[in-house]
């Protein structure tokens, strides 16, 4: 399949389906046509072109990444005093109950099933901070993650590059999926579905044999080129920060004056219009530029479960904890077929495909610690 024919628009609301099963495709479906070159195109600024980003909804999406409280109340249909945030939050929790409050129900369902833990990183294990390079997890959180990984298969699925998220987490006992699941690494002995051809055999930084799954590997030169172009065209916008995640790239505007958000949107729009095989998605004060392939965090969850021999939903209870729009794809996978629990981390009401909620990273840590305590007590009882 030649991805150049997939879509002429650089911006898609949803990925274009490639109509292949998770493990059934051949790597060639992700290949670009031979001889494709990616000339470095640095667009000239075009005065009066802001209508582009206004008419295509980019600015609306950027502004709604941190919606004012009144807007959120309307979204969830709650009719309460707008400044009474606690009451509003507790009303919202009727639909998305606290995973801490329903902890006993979760472990009752997990009885005799194998729990598998999937964790987002930013906003889930670490607080959201102004400088993405300083989004560190606490010592307590690292201990909690290490604890769950001792008893349950545990994977981190982040929008960051795999190397970067490993550097921030620093635990060798986890599975890591970077770039929204487009860069997955297993140790060689952990990979059950070794019979398909999409793995690359490699070695990790400790020299251990690993298998890599990288469905967007052919996009690496294109992403690098777009990253460099975005750095160039945004260099005069104070606070703009471009991050290269190898298989995708991020434009952070958290520290950009909101008067300059239209300019950021226009710069990204002008760059992407020359790359029909890339698309844009919106995160929390960040624009994500990603390849147009049918792959997301939900697909990564299914792939990890299948590759680890844990896809039988009668025996396995997956739990996915995340805070961002990109985590909704994983929540959706777990909701469909009632396979497990999606847990949204949010301190404000918002619509989600998750079943449950946690308010912040402190509650995430408490939930992970509760799982460890429950496991240790139930193992002691069975001894
Ligand atoms: Mg996040």
Image (cartoon, helix red, strand yellow):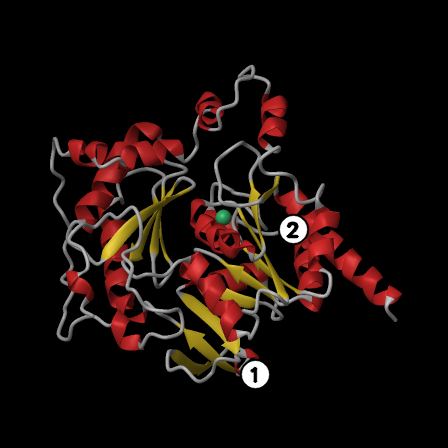
To which quarter of the image does residue 269 belong?
A: top left
Image location (x, y in percent) of residue 244: 35, 58
Residue at disc 1, secondary structure: helix
The residue that disc 1 covers is 189
> Can you say which quadrant of the picture contains the N terminus?
bottom left
Q: CA distance from mark 2 to mark 1?
A: 30 Å
**Residue 149 visible in image:** yes
To which quarter of the image does residue 286 belong?
A: top left
The answer to whether 182 is drawn above or below residue 43 in the figure is: below
Q: Earlier in the sequence, mark 2 or mark 1?
A: 2
> Can you say which quadrant of the picture contains the C terminus?
bottom right
Q: Which label lies toward us, 2 or 1?
A: 1
The answer to whether 16 is drawn above or below residue 195 in the figure is: above
Respond yes or no on whether mark 1 lies under 8 Å from ligand 1: no
Mark 1 nearby-residue class (10 Å; few <14, some 14–19, many ≥20) = few
The residue that disc 2 covers is 138
Q: In this rendered view, identify the residue nearer to me: 340 or 131.
A: 340
To which quarter of the image does residue 21 belong?
A: bottom left
Residue at disc 2, secondary structure: loop
Residue positioned 53% across, 45% down in the render: 354
Where residue 206 is drawn, which disc sits there? none
Q: How many marks?
A: 2
Mark 2 nearby-residue class (10 Å; few <14, some 14–19, many ≥20) = some
Q: Are marks 2 and 1 in contact (CB under 8 Å)?
A: no
Residue positioned 70% across, 44% down in the render: 102
Residue positioned 48% across, 72% down in the render: 185
């Amino acid at each position: 399949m030649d991805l150049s024919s997939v879509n002429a628009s650089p911006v898609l609301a949803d990925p274009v389906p490639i109509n292949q099963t998770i493990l059934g495709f051949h790597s060639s479906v992700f290949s670009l046509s031979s001889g494709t070159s990616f000339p470095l195109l640095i667009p000239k600024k075009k005065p009066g072109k802001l209508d582009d980003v206004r008419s295509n909804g980019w600015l609306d999406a950027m502004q709604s990444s941190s919606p004012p409280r009144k807007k959120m109340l309307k979204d969830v249909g709650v009719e309460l005093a707008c400044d009474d945030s606690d009451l509003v939050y507790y009303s919202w929790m009727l639909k998305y109950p606290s995973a801490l409050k329903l902890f006993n129900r979760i472990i009752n369902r997990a009885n005799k099933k194998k729990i598998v833990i999937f964790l987002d990183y930013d906003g889930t294990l670490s607080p959201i901070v102004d400088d993405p390079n300083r989004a560190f997890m606490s010592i307590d959180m690292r201990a909690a993650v290490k604890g769950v990984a001792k008893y349950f298969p545990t994977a981190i699925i982040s929008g960051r590059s795999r190397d970067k998220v490993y550097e921030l987490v620093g635990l060798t006992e986890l599975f890591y999926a970077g770039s929204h699941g487009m860069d997955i690494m297993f140790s060689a002995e952990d990979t059950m579905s070794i019979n398909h051809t999409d793995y690359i055999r490699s070695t990790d930084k400790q020299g251990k044999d690993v298998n890599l799954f990288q469905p967007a590997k052919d996009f690496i030169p294109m992403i690098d080129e777009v990253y460099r172009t975005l750095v160039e065209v945004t260099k005069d916008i104070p606070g703009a920060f471009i991050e290269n995640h190898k298989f995708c790239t991020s434009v952070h505007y958290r520290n950009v004056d909101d008067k300059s958000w239209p300019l950021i949107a226009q710069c990204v729009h002008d760059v992407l219009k020359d790359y029909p095989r890339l698309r844009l998605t919106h995160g929390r004060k960040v624009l994500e530029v990603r390849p147009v392939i049918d792959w997301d965090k939900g697909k990564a969850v299914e792939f990890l479960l299948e590759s680890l021999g844990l896809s039988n939903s009668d025996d396995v209870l997956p739990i996915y904890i995340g805070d961002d729009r990109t985590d909704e794809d994983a929540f959706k996978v777990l909701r469909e077929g009632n396979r497990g629990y999606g847990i949204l981390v949010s301190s404000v009401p918002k619509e989600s495909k998750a079943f449950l909620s946690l308010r912040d990273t402190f509650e995430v840590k408490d939930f992970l610690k509760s799982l460890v305590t429950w496991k240790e007590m139930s193992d002691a009882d069975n001894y």
